[in-house]
Image (cartoon, rainbow, N blue to C red):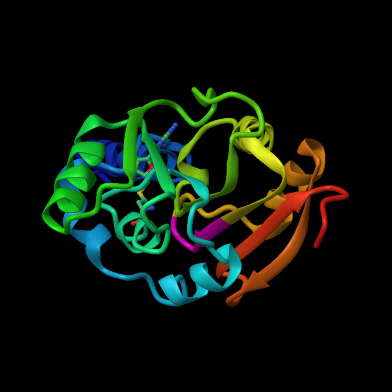
């Protein structure tokens, strides 16, 4: 191989290495420019399965982290009745604006949006009857801190539902259960195959 070919091979290997490093380690939030993909339901992570584990009752106060374009938020808000409330928090204003504009168009008035980071939730302890996040946890560095914060804002008999899908930010259920264990949450239900699962966690010693 001549020197030019060697240099080309070296540069190509470096580029592939950099791309691989980005793929496995990048934790930037999902780009708003690619929002149309978020409107497509994910295989196995259906709203029907989310409903089965979340078991919303009218009048409850519920939190969603990272609603994206509102695939789950608009569906859940519709179950809360006039006295219920869904708080959505996201680190990107554009996602929140998008959901609120869809909610207005659908006549849904029970969603409240706030820009916040899931590692530092702007809510007092024991605020929520339920919380959920779908394909979000793996995007956030320090997932243990997110689960701890969610435990803090859940009422003692509250429930947390986490949806995870095999993409580059996938969080295996064993990792999730470890974070839950540290935070005082235990598994109380699970749906879907391991690579596209919903898991429900409840505070330890809460009524089942
Ligand atoms: C892949 S999208 C998922 C959207 C939606 N849950 C769905 O399943 O279609 C991830 C969302 O999490 C948000 N997000 C990422 N990091 C966050 C953080 N640290 N705190 C709050 N939201 C965050 C992103 O802005 C984005 O809206």
Q: Quadrant of residue 13?
A: top left
Residue at the extreme left: 105
Residue 138 image offset from top left, x and y in percent: 51, 45
Residue 171 image offset from top left, x and y in percent: 58, 52
Q: In the rendered picture of this protein, how many numbered marks are placed on residues?
A: 0
- Of the 4 image quadrants, the one containing the C terminus is bottom right
Residue 17 in sight in this render? no
Which residue is more in the foreground, 192 or 129?
Answer: 129
Q: Residue at x 75, y 63 (%)?
A: 188
Q: Is residue 185 left or right of residue 90?
A: right
- Can you say whether 121 is above or below 73 in the image? above
Q: Residue at x 56, y 63 (%)?
A: 54
Q: Quadrant of ligand 1?
A: top left
Q: Residue at x 53, y 25 (%)?
A: 123
- Can you say whether 51 is above or below 83 in the image? below
Residue 197 image offset from top left, x and y in percent: 57, 68
Q: Is residue 138 left or right of residue 87?
A: right
- Can you say whether 76 is above or below 136 in the image? below
Q: Main secondary structure of the magenta part?
A: strand
Q: Is residue 198 left or right of residue 133?
A: right
Residue at the extreme front: 83
Residue 19 inside the magenta-drawn segment = no
Q: Residue at x 34, y 29 (%)?
A: 114
Q: Quadrant of residue 112?
A: top left
Residue 160 image offset from top left, x and y in percent: 62, 51
Which residue is more in the foreground, 83 or 114?
Answer: 83
First to last magenta residue range? 162-167
Which residue is more in the foreground, 2 or 194?
Answer: 194
Q: Is residue 127 left or right of residue 204?
A: left
């Amino acid at each position: 191989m001549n020197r030019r070919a060697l240099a080309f091979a070296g540069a190509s290997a470096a580029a592939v290495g950099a791309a691989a490093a980005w793929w496995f380690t990048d934790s930037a939030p999902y780009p708003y420019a690619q929002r149309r993909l978020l409107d497509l339901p994910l295989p196995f992570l259906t709203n029907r399965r989310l409903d089965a584990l979340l078991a919303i009752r009218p009048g409850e106060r519920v939190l969603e982290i990272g609603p994206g374009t509102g695939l789950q938020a608009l569906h859940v808000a519709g179950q809360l009745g006039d006295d219920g409330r869904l708080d959505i928090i996201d680190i990107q204003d554009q996602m929140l604006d998008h959901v609120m504009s869809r909610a207005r168009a659908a006549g849904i008035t029970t969603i409240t949006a706030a820009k916040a980071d899931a590692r530092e939730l702007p809510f007092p302890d024991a605020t929520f009857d339920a919380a959920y996040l779908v394909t979000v946890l793996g995007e956030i560095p320090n997932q243990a801190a997110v689960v701890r914060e969610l435990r803090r804002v859940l009422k003692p008999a509250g429930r947390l539902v986490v949806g995870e899908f095999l993409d580059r930010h996938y969080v295996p259920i064993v990792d999730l259960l470890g974070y839950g264990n540290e935070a005082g949450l235990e598994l109380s239900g699970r749906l879907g195959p391991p690579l596209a699962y919903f898991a429900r966690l409840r505070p330890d010693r809460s009524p089942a």
